[in-house]
Image (cartoon, rainbow, N blue to C red):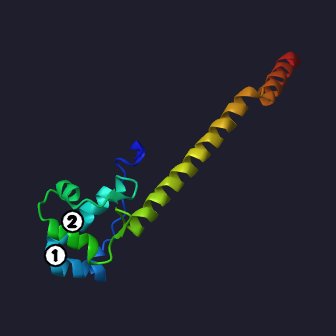
Amino acid sequence: MSNRLENHWFKHDMNASNDNKIRKLEFRNGLEGYAAFFKIVELLMSNNGEIEYDIELICNFLGTTNEELVSSTINNFGLFIVDNGYIYNERVSTQLYEITEKSKKASENANKRWEKEKSKQMIPNKTNEKEESTNKDWINDL
């Protein structure tokens, strides 16, 4: 994962706990399940949107030994996609895409501005030459 995303924030809906999937998660796994969900989302955000489906490693990251809770959070509520030994989340993937695209556009715009400024510096300033000659003419008229 690139360093530019290392300290990046991610969107968290202020009413996430009202989502039906999250409500089921919370009902069955309590606030520990809710916390596990967001810790896994953080892990996905810092690993380019995917993590290996290794419950022991994920538990280590979450700071828990409750493998049943972590497995349930990942598999039972439709919050994550498990495919070919990796875990994904659609929302995380979308946000990472948006962040990357926004960064690309900002970089392109910065490069355009830089090129524009660079080209301005290479072209002699005709306006200043005209002002200087006008000033000299006025002085000569005295």
> Are the two marked residues, 2 and 1, in contact with CB atoms closer than 8 angstroms?
yes
Residue in the image at 52% along x and 54% along y:
102
Residue 138 place in picture, x, y as percent: 84, 22
Nearer-the-camera pick, 126 or 81:
81
Query: Where residue 118 sits in the image (x, y, percent)?
Result: 68, 31
Residue in front for this viewpoint, 78 or 95: 78
Q: Quadrant of residue 136?
A: top right
Which of the two residues, 20 or 135, is positioned nearer the viewer here?
Answer: 20
Considering only vertical position in the picture, is 23 above or below 86? Answer: below
Q: Is residue 35 above or below residue 102?
A: below
Query: Type of residue at label 2?
Result: Ala
Q: Which residue lies at the image location 29% right of the left edge and 83% below the top edge?
A: 20
Position of residue 130 in the picture relative to residue 111 (left or right): right
Quadrant of the rendered image containing residue 19? bottom left
Which element is circle 1 on? helix
Q: Is residue 75 above or below residue 41?
A: below
Q: Earlier in the sequence, mark 2 or mark 1?
A: 1
The circle drawn on residue 106 is: none
Q: Which mark is on residue 29?
A: 1
| Rendered view: 116 above or below 25 | above
The Cα atoms of the two marked residues, 2 and 1, are separated by: 9 Å
Q: Which residue is mark 2?
A: 36
Tell me the amino acid under the disc marked 1.
Asn
State left or right for residue 92 relative to residue 138. Answer: left
Residue 103 is situated, as x and y percent measured from the top left of the image, at: 51, 50
